[in-house]
């Protein structure tokens, strides 16, 4: 009888959650959602929210204010969605604290006119006036409107089509996407388990618990899902190894140590939909037979840690974690392990060493974690994104998931699109979409109509692909074939203002400082490679540096135990392969065509453009700029430290400070 | 007398943290994190404390404290400035921002100003790549920071 009562109780909870969710998104109370992920908060979303709430309070409008995660349209943050009863939910972008009062005024426009009414009546009339008009009513709102956010569970009247504000799912940044791992991100309140459950959360767990573990593994195998953390190992196979490994005690680790600079998909998922990861872990634990779970999350993500902690407690309260889960007799609990800032801990054996409380240094495999992992017990490690795909795979079937994708790369992949693109953000696309579709279609191309110079994929272990490969499909094999990797999915677009040699130097600076020091080729090789690149960037490079770099790169690659060392030379090798001429310019002509390498450039003031405002002079930290008010200013090249403060200070309307090639270098 | 009381308090704290670990397994990092939360950094004294408590050699604890970039071995300033050095931030002007603040504050990254007001450091990536360059001041994150807006942000701290 216990079994029935536990699952019945949960079914009841689900029904209640569903009706509460529907009441929230299409009820009688206006709803205001603010995108409150770290990226939104860095764009002052928290302040916008405060200002809007205050404005509503003053107006006497009773509205529900809710936090949501990141919808992925990071370029337009802060994002705010407003739902007026009887009208579609409309998503607005760039609602900064400065314009937030005007924004609320515009949305509830009618409130301003009728001064004689009492405040309560005024508020009612504001809401009703707002609901009578269709779509964003004013120029102000139309400018900021990104589309209507209609959800399948909404009633049709709340999903009506309005030519003024088409559906957000038709937005050029979202339309080409297939959102599986990101299905709830930016839609639900991540701190509210009811929302997750109302939208079908934990149904996959119930289904999986009713299946024999082998069948769950079969389903995951059929989906073709591969590890989304970087290595791309087939998930189902990894599970099977661990399941078959003898032992009563087995561990499951969620790798949330997203240390790859330029990647933020795991952060967005953890901050926007933490229960998806927990449900994924439960499914994996059931399939493998794990008894205890850990989420290893980096300390640099305090908000993700906080939301995970809340989500774990909620899951425990609902009987989804702990002993006798949903009355099925399964025991499993998850604890959080905070990483302490070491990139190498993304590597599974280093990660386990770190959980064990030691220096996070990788070790040789075999033995593989599936046989002897954490504290010598069989251990399975999956990445955040991998885990958050699982509930959809179980619910809709492995063959459904494998419909997306190309070749051996099945399903979808989240990409953090950043750098020089108009629409930067977090996206999820079917594998096999071309770089061009991602950068020009979803990303909207390069700002200022500059040319795309290169695409950095896979972070510091990845590569630098030139624009000629724009038609390359984004999948594990195609990227590897060109010398790069998928990695965790960071994709940074660079334009002609970026120096390729300097970029390679940047990545090497990172890998060199993050090398744990265990393997000599990595510890010393990365240092030597960095020194050579620094020399080239300073204009002191010699032609012999290139073959030396190549030789070092091959030594580091083949002589290192883990992915950090094996991947560290990739940025150098790919840039040498595809951008050799840029190295040559640095070495032979002592020129940096992108005007980045400080020793190879100079700052000067264009006499024709300078209005003598003196801002540059005030900003110069070393007093290298002279000139009287209203007269042309001059930079003393010998005193200039090339910090760029004058370029930053010179008003955009003048743009008198410019960079040029240094006239005399060595 | 006072010292003894403090020591006992520390032991209580450590016991509290240790509860989550069977036989102290894997406790070194969380303990150091807790110590850092309390003191703001890991002093030589704290290394000894943790080593004694876990019955580990001091060198091992020190090795762990120096391995992870989160642990600070120098007392941080009243205001903590972190500049993001992720790829997107670096390419978007993060390096210039770091150099600028390093010059303005008169300290190298990883150090604290003499008056104890500011400490400056870099962070691998704050995951706000679309808002580059990003900096965090006392845990608050700012996106799209220019050299002049960084000055303003620091000038307006209390």
Image (spheres, coloured by chain):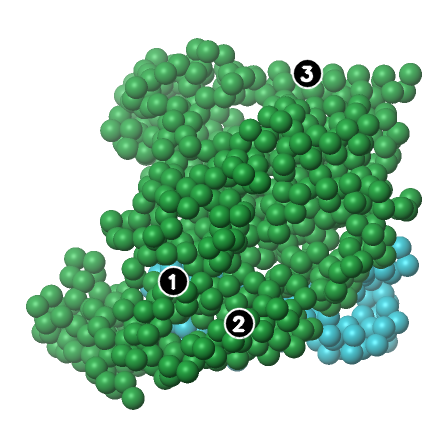
Chain B drawn in what color? cyan
Q: Please tell me which residue is depicted at 69% across the width and 34% down the height of the picture.
A: A220
Chain under disc 2: A
Q: Where on the picture, by quarter, is residue B27?
A: bottom right
Residue A59, how many percent across, how many down?
40, 27
Residue ID for mark 1: A578
Q: Please tell me which residue is depicted at 37% across the width and 56% down the height of the picture.
A: A466
Q: Secondary structure at mark 3?
A: helix
Q: Earlier in the sequence, mark 2 or mark 3?
A: 3
Residue A529, how many percent across, how many down?
50, 76
* Chain colored green: A
Q: Where on the picture, by quarter, is residue A134?
A: top left
Q: Secondary structure at mark 2?
A: helix
Residue ID for mark 3: A15
Side of A494 relative to A270 (left or right) = left
Residue ID for mark 2: A553
Foreground of the two, A130 or A590: A590
Label 2 and label 3: CA atoms lie apart by: 59 Å
**Disc 1 + disc 3, Cβ < 8 Å:** no
């Amino acid at each position: 009888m216990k079994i029935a009562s536990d699952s019945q109780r949960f079914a009841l909870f689900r029904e209640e959650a569903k009706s509460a969710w529907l009441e929230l998104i299409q009820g009688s109370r206006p709803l205001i959602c603010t995108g409150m992920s770290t990226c939104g908060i860095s764009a002052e979303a928290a302040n916008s929210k405060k200002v809007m709430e205050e404005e509503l309070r003053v107006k006497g409008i009773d509205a529900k204010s809710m936090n949501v995660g990141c919808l992925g349209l990071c370029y337009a943050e802060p994002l705010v969605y407003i739902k007026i009863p009887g009208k579609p939910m409309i998503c607005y972008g760039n609602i900064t604290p400065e314009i937030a009062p005007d924004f609320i005024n515009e949305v509830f426009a009618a409130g301003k006119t009728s001064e004689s009414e009492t405040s309560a009546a005024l508020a009612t009339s504001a809401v009703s006036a707002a609901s009578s008009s269709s779509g964003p009513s004013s120029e102000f709102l139309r400018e900021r409107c990104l589309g209507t956010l209609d959800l399948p569970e909404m009633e049709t009247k709340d999903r009506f089509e309005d030519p003024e504000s088409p559906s957000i799912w038709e937005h050029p940044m979202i339309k080409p996407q297939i959102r599986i791992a990101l299905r709830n991100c930016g839609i639900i309140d991540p701190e509210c388990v009811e929302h997750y459950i109302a939208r079908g959360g934990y149904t996959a767990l119930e289904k999986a618990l009713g299946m024999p573990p082998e069948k769950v593994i079969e389903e995951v195998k059929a989906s073709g899902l591969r590890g989304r953390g970087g290595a791309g190992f087939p998930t189902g196979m990894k599970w099977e190894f661990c399941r078959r490994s003898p032992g009563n005690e087995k561990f499951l680790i969620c790798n949330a140590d997203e240390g790859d600079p330029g990647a933020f998909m795991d952060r967005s998922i953890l901050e926007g939909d933490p229960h998806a990861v927990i449900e994924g872990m439960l499914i994996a634990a059931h399939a493998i037979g794990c008894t205890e779970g850990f989420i290893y999350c980096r300390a640099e993500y305090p908000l993700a840690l906080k939301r995970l902690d809340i989500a774990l407690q909620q899951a425990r309260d609902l009987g989804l974690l702990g002993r006798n889960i949903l009355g099925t007799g399964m025991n499993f609990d998850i604890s959080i392990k905070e990483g302490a800032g070491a990139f190498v801990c993304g590597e599974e054996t280093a990660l386990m060493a770190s959980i064990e409380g030691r220096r996070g240094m990788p070790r040789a495999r075999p033995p593989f974690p599936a046989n002897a992992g954490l504290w010598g017990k069989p251990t399975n490690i999956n990445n955040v994104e991998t885990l958050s795909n699982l509930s959809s795979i179980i619910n809709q079937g492995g063959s459904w998931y494998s419909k997306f994708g190309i070749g051996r790369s099945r399903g979808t992949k989240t990409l953090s699109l950043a750098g020089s693109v108009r629409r930067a953000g977090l996206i999820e696309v079917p594998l096999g979409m071309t770089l061009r579709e991602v950068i020009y279609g979803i990303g909207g191309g390069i700002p200022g109509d500059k040319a795309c110079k290169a695409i950095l994929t896979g972070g510091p272990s990845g590569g630098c692909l030139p624009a000629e490969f724009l038609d390359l499909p984004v999948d594990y094999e195609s990227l590897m074939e060109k010398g790069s990797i998928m990695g965790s999915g960071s994709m940074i677009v660079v334009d002609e203002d970026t120096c390729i040699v300097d970029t390679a130097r940047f990545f090497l600076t990172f890998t060199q400082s993050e090398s744990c020091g265990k393997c000599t080729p990595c510890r010393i090789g990365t240092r030597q490679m960095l020194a050579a690149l620094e020399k080239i960037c300073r204009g002191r490079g010699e032609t012999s540096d290139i073959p030396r770099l190549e030789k070092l790169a091959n030594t580091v690659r083949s002589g290192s135990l883990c992915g950090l060392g094996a991947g560290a030379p990739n940025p150098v090798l790919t840039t040498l392969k595809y951008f050799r001429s840029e190295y040559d310019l640095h070495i032979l002509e002592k020129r940096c065509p992108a005007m980045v390498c400080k020793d190879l450039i100079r700052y000067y003031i264009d006499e024709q453009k300078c209005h003598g405002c003196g801002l540059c002079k005030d900003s110069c930290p070393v007093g290298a700029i002279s000139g009287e008010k209203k007269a042309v200013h001059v930079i003393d090249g010998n005193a200039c430290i090339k910090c760029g403060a004058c370029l930053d200070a010179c008003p955009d309307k003048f743009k008198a400070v410019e960079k040029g090639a240094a006239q005399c270098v060595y | 007398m006072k010292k003894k009381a403090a020591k006992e308090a520390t032991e209580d704290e450590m016991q509290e943290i240790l509860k989550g670990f069977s036989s102290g397994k894997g406790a070194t990092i969380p303990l150091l994190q807790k110590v850092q939360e309390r003191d703001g950094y890991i002093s030589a004294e704290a290394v000894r404390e943790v080593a004694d408590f876990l019955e580990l050699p001091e060198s091992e604890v020190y090795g762990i404290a120096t391995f992870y970039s989160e642990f600070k071995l120098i007392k941080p300033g009243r205001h903590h400035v972190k500049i993001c050095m992720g790829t997107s931030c670096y390419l978007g002007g993060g390096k210039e921002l770091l150099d600028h603040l390093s010059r303005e504050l008169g300290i190298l990254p990883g150090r604290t100003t003499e008056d104890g007001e500011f400490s400056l450091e870099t962070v691998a990536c704050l995951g706000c790549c679309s808002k580059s360059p990003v900096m965090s001041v006392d845990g608050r994150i700012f996106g799209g920071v220019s050299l002049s807006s960084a000055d303003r942000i620091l000038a307006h701290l209390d």
